[in-house]
Amino acid sequence: MSANYTYRDSNLWQKYLSPQGADDKHKYARARLSSSFEKTHTAIVPLVAHISQELPSLTMHDVTHVDALWAVADVLLGADFQINPIEVYVLGITFLLHDSATSSFAFPNGLHGLFETVQWKDFVAQNNFSEHQMQRGEEGYQLALFETLRLLHSEQAAELLVQSWPGLDGHPRYLLEDLELRNHYGREIGRISASHGIDAAAVESTWGYVPPIPPHSSLQVEGANWSVDCLKLALLLRCIDAAHIDSLRAPDMQAALTNPSGESKNHWVFQNKLSVVALNNKRELYWSGSTFSVNQSAAWWRCFETAKMVDKEVRVANRMLSNHGRPVLSATGVMGAGDISEFIKNVPVEGWQPIDFGFQVSQVGSVIEKFGGAKLYGDKKYLALKELIQNSSDAIRARRLHAAKKTHGRIDISLSETDGDVWLNVQDDGIGMSEYVLTDILLDFGRSLWKDPAFRQQWSGLASKGFTPNGQFGIGFFSVFMLGDEIKVTSWRYGTDIEKQVVLHLRNRVLERPILLTPVAKDRLTEPGTRISIRLAEGKKSLLRTFTSYGLVNKKFASIEKTESIEELVAYLAPTLDIDIFVSSTEEDICVIRANDWKELPPGALLKRLYPQSSAAIIEKYSSSVRNIYETGGDIIGRASISIESRSISSELDGVLVHQGIVAGQCKGILGVLLSDNNSDLARGNANPVVSASALTLWAHEQLESSGKNKVPRLSERVASLGVSDSSLIVGKLSGSSMSISDLIEHFKDDSIEELVFSMDQPECPSDMSVDTFEEFGYFDEIVDLSDCNSTNRFDFGLKDWIGKILPESDDHPKTLLNVLKVKFSSSFPNSEIFYEYRNIGSADDITIKENCLVIKK
């Protein structure tokens, strides 16, 4: 097929729409149809010409592609396919329209109209593009334009025949000027044109049982069987368009000017190499091509995948046509689509060999265990419940945003017994999942719906409204296999009929094929949403934690084991959630979390929620010093107390970091809760607080003021790290008495004192001394003991570089206890010397111990 080929050269045109001789009794109808088509063809040329101007990375979608579809149709249909002139006319108009809306010029308000579409806003929001990235010509802008037009072009194709453009004379111009034909066929022509962008099953559902459209009376074809079969034409359009992948779509000079890259380049390369499609003696489609080098292997694989796609379209179309009593295509499939050795006979390679092998997961259960379960989360099986609560809260927030109901939603969690098995059930009234999401996305390991393009199609508008999910990696659901091998997911997508809910049943991990079921009446959801049920492999032990503590038992000191309740675990995992959570372990539903109640709970109740394993003594010790952390504007972003426990304190008493209400991480030196950013690691353990420097320092000052008798060096060490440089900080002991910086300054003012010596670290036992002997060590009276905290190194709260970034240290703004001390002494005694030197600090069994010390000398 040459570049000068037009639709008039096709057998289809010649046989049905060109003049058939003087005795043709339907010559008027043919002439009118052909004239109408040619005028629409002329009108469409400038519209499709704009596609390559706006989206230069696309292969050609101009009039050469439109006309080439007639030649492809000749191959797929063959000479004897049953079709009539009006159907050929309608099919030809769909050729013109189907891709014509891949340009802003096809939309009533052009580019500005596209910028206002939900699709544009969703894509920009989902990718977090900056204002600069959205400038015309920038990569982000081009990606957004491509993605928006990709999603909208088929839908807009349905509107093109009823849409008008103002002419120079002020009168409207239509692509199809024949008013009678436009009114009679236009709606279905538009729908057929748009249908190439939807699933073939939807095409069958739309037209499979719809009678054909009879000819318009003005065509004067009474007695002729010229009715329009929409199912047939929609399936033809899909197959014909899919099969046009030859060099006309990727001409050499256009490629040189465009210089495509990435995946676009693969499309250009493989199509540039292919001849027009042909039919072999087995009625299989094939393309001949020049050889693909090693550097073009990615393009060859894209070619092979495209050929398989065409093969599927042809086979599905033939099956549907046959099932509905329509004529089938002359083509039966694509040569070599299932056999690479056959495919490379016509699309050859040079210097390399394609292997029909994809990366496989033969041990699916093993991969899930390593990356979605125990190997990722360690022995913390209870984190699987956290993932489920997180998924439910995401779904509820999505529904809130979609339905504009800010307070909608609740999560119900229960442990139930059936035939001796214990089941964990987590149910929400969120946005729910369609069958497609359940089967194609939920079970696709590592594929997150919220980050997937399918999210913008399933729930158009949510991303642009600011929906920010907690889930991000697409593996959280698979953590449920830490708890049990049998899972049932019942879901009812919001906005669909109750009959649309479905159950996904996973058995024996995923070693057995999942099955889809229609829920029986007793298991049906009464509200759109999702219920996940897990048969716990070891009963409640699979989920609930057991803690060991020490205390008096029958007046004797002994270890005490306590197994937490499901209510305690839920409260710990979602302590600040903005959604009600009800838990039922008996007949009664208990509201464990009331939306946002953490801001109003008494301090003791909040700490008990955060530390269900802690003793009453710890709760009482810190309750009085819990203070709210306020951000600018008055928002509460935390409620906590500085911990004065040692650095070796159990992680079970670390500060709790939460993101969108769910536990996201921990921090040292704090008892309480802080809002944080989202996890940065797959194991969901790393997060940083979202708090300003000013809010932190203000809270740290309040901690110091409220400390009372708990004002000890460890407290000083931690508030100093947060920007407190008060002289009241307790730094250590002198002759056994606790000393603040101001105390030491007053002490140093004594004229009889020439220097102060500060021992900064715990002294080490000399190699020639026994440990028992060293235990008798005591400081000399003139030595200031700073060993009760780390006065030299800044306390980082177990968050690595976070504290240094939010509150950087400088000479003028010290953030370690020792540096605060030096600044205060330098200010009070400007002529003093401050240096480090090894000094005798104490003795054990009359043996003197020497350590590196800070010395301040007058």
Image: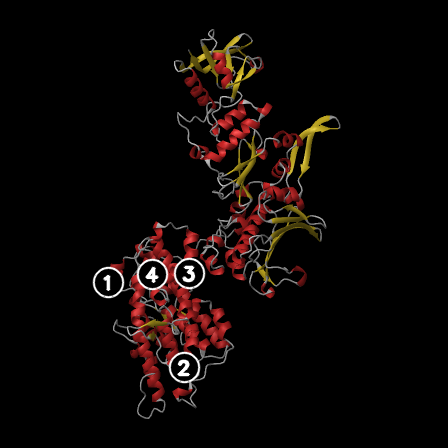
Disc 3 or 4, which lies upstream in sequence? 3
* Disc nearer the start of the sequence (1/4): 1
Mark 1 vs mark 4, CA separation in Å: 15 Å
What is the quadrant of the N terminus in the image?
bottom left
Disc 2, SS: loop
Residue at (44% x, 70% y) in the render: 195
Q: Is residue 661 above or below residue 532?
A: above
- In front: 12, or 209? 209
Kindly identify which residue carries mark 2: 83
Instruction: State the residue at coordinates (53%, 10%).
Output: 781
Mark 1 crowd level (few <14, some 14–19, many ≥20, 10 Å Cα): few
Please provide percent x and percent y for residue 418. 70, 53
Q: Earlier in the sequence, mark 3 or mark 1?
A: 3
Kind of residue indicated by mark 4: His
Compute the Cα span from label 1 to label 2. Answer: 38 Å
How many residues crowd around disc 3 within 10 Å: few (fewer than 14), some, or many (20 or more)?
Answer: some
**SS type, badge 4:** helix
Q: Amino acid at mark 2?
A: Ile
**Image quarter of residue 66:** bottom left
Q: Earlier in the sequence, mark 2 or mark 4?
A: 2
Q: Which residue is mark 1?
A: 253
SS of the residue under disc 1:
helix
Colouring method of the image: secondary structure
Q: Nearer the viewer, residue 823 or 785?
A: 823
Q: Position of residue 162 (x, y in %)?
A: 40, 74
The residue pinned by badge 3 equals 117
Q: Determine the secondary structure under disc 3.
A: loop
Left or right: residue 177 compared with residue 847? left
